[in-house]
Amino acid sequence: MTLSIDQYAQLSRWRERPVLEKALLAIGMLLLAISLPPLPGAPCIIVCVLGVTLLDARVPLRLWLRHAVIPAGFLLTAGLTMLFDIGRHGLSLAPAGLSTVGGLLLRSCAGICCLLLLALTTPVTDILAGLRRIGLPREIAEISLLMYRLVFLLLDTASAMHIAQAARLGQRNRKQQLRSLGLLLANLFPRTMDRAGRMENGLAARGWNGEFMVLRRTQPLSPLRLTWTSLLLGSVLLVGSLFS
Amino acid sequence: MHIMEGYLPAKHCLAWYTVSAPFFAAGVWRIRKILAERPQARMNLAAAGAFAFVLSALKMPSVTGSCSHPTGTGFGAVVFGPAVMAVLGAMVLLFQALLLAHGGLTTLGANLFSMAIVGPWVSYGLWKLCQRLGWSVAVSMFLAAALGDLATYVTTSIQLALAYPDPVGGFMTAAIKFGGIFALTQVPLAIAEGMLTVVVMDALAGK
Amino acid sequence: MNTILSVQQLGHSFPGDITALSDIDLSIRQGRCLALLGPNGSGKSTFLQHLNGSLRPQHGRVLLQQEPVSYSRQGLNRLRSKVGLVLQDADDQLFAASVYEDISFGPLNQGLTAAETGQRVEAAIQAMGLAGLENRPPHMLSGGQKKRVAIAGALAMAPQVLLLDEPTAGLDHAGIAQLIDILQSLMQRGITIVFSTHDVDLACRLADDIALFAAGRLIGFGERSRILLDQAMLLTAGLSPSLLLQMVAFARQHGWLAADAAMPRTDREIMDLIGKWQQAACQPA
Amino acid sequence: MNTILSVQQLGHSFPGDITALSDIDLSIRQGRCLALLGPNGSGKSTFLQHLNGSLRPQHGRVLLQQEPVSYSRQGLNRLRSKVGLVLQDADDQLFAASVYEDISFGPLNQGLTAAETGQRVEAAIQAMGLAGLENRPPHMLSGGQKKRVAIAGALAMAPQVLLLDEPTAGLDHAGIAQLIDILQSLMQRGITIVFSTHDVDLACRLADDIALFAAGRLIGFGERSRILLDQAMLLTAGLSPSLLLQMVAFARQHGWLAADAAMPRTDREIMDLIGKWQQAACQPA
């Protein structure tokens, strides 16, 4: 099993760009999205961010869509809840709900666009390094880095286990599925801890003394791109707050 | 089910970040203390976090479709303690947002509060209570996991109701509406998670 | 002989990944042993996973006894009851607290009664030489023993076809010898065996037929000696003839081995051949 | 030649486990390549872990350049700077976000500056043929590539001795050939190499000396051909002579190969020998 977002981020055209540049754009837009009124802020952000994602970072539309639909379930449940009213006469359409839900829909879409721009161009480890620089405690950053590495090893193991169970009809019915999943996790947990123990040995052999020092190669910031990004953020802020 | 990116207004995002921060800080303090004694614990904590993430990436058989996955809250709280879970939970939520597009960055504070603070503390409290009452491990574990799960969803409902109170009935009506929808969809999941946790603990005991 | 499993124009690709299968046509005949031979990353494992429905073809189709496989739950259950799968790493497939319990997992899922399951489990334990280990927890077994438990788990479901992914990975000389004995005894019981390997000698030793994979394509398929003695084809696949195969080629070239004689399978057979020739050469012409 | 590492009366046992080492005396000479040969579970890996201080002897001691190893943090750092270890599963020692970062981990731990580390990393990347993969995360590499990154990580620490546990495990024919080339080039640079294996042919191919392990004991130690051609000793260890070794023995026995001639290492060398003999035998006596 692979995580396609990670895979894409690792191979992204923007992979080498400094995290700060990418974060300024994506998180800046994200903050605008939740701060500005949905109209006309959200559509502006969607157009800008999606445009950059598809045209400049060259994320394939199909890949983008596949991940953009993931939160749809949440949007549907929570949105529908707000659309309807439970009153004396049972279920009825909430009169004021429509515009609120419409605005919410737009803002959530803008949020997803920003999140995906960051996620599809920046590997998690780069983001962790960035967070470390702005004050994430060293221990937590190191644990997260190891976590990232272990996640892929565990996913491979878990997916092999799942295949093995399915081959022996472990997914026959719902009850059996639950039992199989339980057995899988119970088998995975000690193996995870084993794996951690062996990694500890492997790193000790390389002189590990409890701190992870690695040499990072970073590209210099591009003043040009920073200027453009700031201009873009500024104009969205202006349009979003003036015309609402 | 986490609150998605962009769903909460800025004020609420900030408020939930602020509420969660002390718990996170306490967790960091606790982890630092553990690491000062045993530097190697780094690896075990990372393994626990990775396990929790993988857990959340697996689909759980349920009635409601693809959004359901085990939260592992109860299991984690009982095995690692609720303080540590606040930090591991934050990392898992960050990974979920960035690797799975599940949850979000601005809503991370709110999700952290429901999933990695309320859930684990409820689970942990119930577990301790049941143990004191002398109930069996299986029953205690089931209750801890299932109700911890449910507490997470109740918290999420309250968070949504606070952000989007009903135009007519206000916060309470909205809370009941969100709570009702989530209860309907999540109670079976909470029960499934409770049973799953019992199977896991049982099989682990056999190892 | 009947075709038990076949694939038609099978294709599969993973997003962003180079490993992919394209356009594979292959028929597996009942009662034969087929080796999927190729270097790492050539698509052998992906192919195996299609044969028991672990993966669903993106192009083409898989047929069980001439009928296209249905990917409904029922269809998959039917397929997996007839086609067992043993993964490369035995640790990935042993779940239960004891060897006995683990082997019973499959038959119980097939809906057999406790009594029937018990018989199946006993028979599998006997066949795999696991007597005495029934109550051991799987994680306390050696690598070779784990492998045999994994095979027993598949065998207890009474499959007609057994798929094995890199069955000798991680085993040492003695473990491999034991595994070969076991697979040969299963073949004698009429079970069709399909295994993947990058070990040319293992394919030579066990297989009747060989399917040669390279970069997700089937570049050769046929009777053992036809594939293995085609040095150019092996090299195209990124493999190279083992010493045994080089000796066989040499022996044929110099007339020690008749072109129509059966191709030796083992070290001993080829050494006997050299021994005979050594004696003959010492005679006055 | 100087002894770089040695063990005296080394013993180690694990609670509840059969794998144990007892009473091992062995000296590793600088600049030679030593194979620890034995079946699975014979104690090779445990032995390797003592050589770089990953395990601490329960009996006896380990000496680095004639001095007993100190197990203080400083002592271990000194040992591990001189003796690098590459584990069987590369995934157990790769942790960083990219190949480049991962290789830099060891030199930085040694206290080198960023500039020196950068040079070491570049050199290791060149030596292991990893150019172009610098920014890849470990989970996007093939098995053979991961192995090379693991070796590069050890190499960047500029060790005098490199320990490798089952270096060819999981590699296919091409991967093994590449690894052999790499290890041979390291040997030419004067690095002492110690590797464990259950593959008799790999030991024959690479090693100068062989230490034969069985059930936690060292049952034979000496120059390559002395150990490998002692069929009885191999069988005692639970191994058996490969086809190459059988042919060498046969060639010696029948006078194709002089008793004092160098023992062939590769398939090609033995095939050449047969070819020559075939031609000679066709001549009139």
Image (tube, coloured by chain):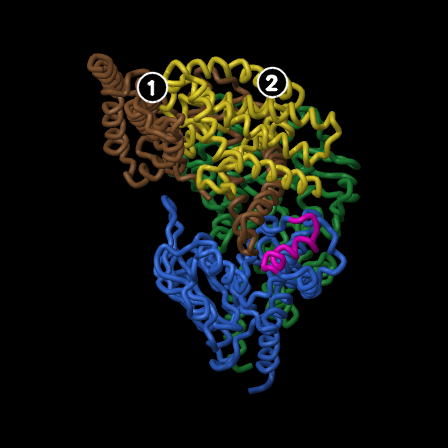
Chain colours: A brown, B yellow, C blue, D green
Q: Mark 2 points at which residue?
A: B32
Q: Is residue C276 visible?
A: yes
Q: Do labels 2 and 1 share a chain?
A: no
Q: How crowded is mark 1: few (under 14 residues within 10 Å), some or many (20 or more)?
A: many
> What secondary structure characterizes most of the magenta part?
helix
Residue bounds of the magenta highlight: C96-111
Q: Give the side of residue B34 with respect to residue D18, left or right.
A: left
Chain hosting mark 2: B
Label 2 is placed on what type of residue?
A: Arg
In front of the other: C185 or C53: C53
| C201 up-or-down from D184: above or below | below
Q: Mark 1 points at which residue?
A: A34
> What separation in Å lies between label 2 and label 1 (alpha carbons)?
34 Å
Q: Is residue C100 magenta?
A: yes
| B169 up-or-down from D16: above or below | above
In front of the other: B142 or A151: B142
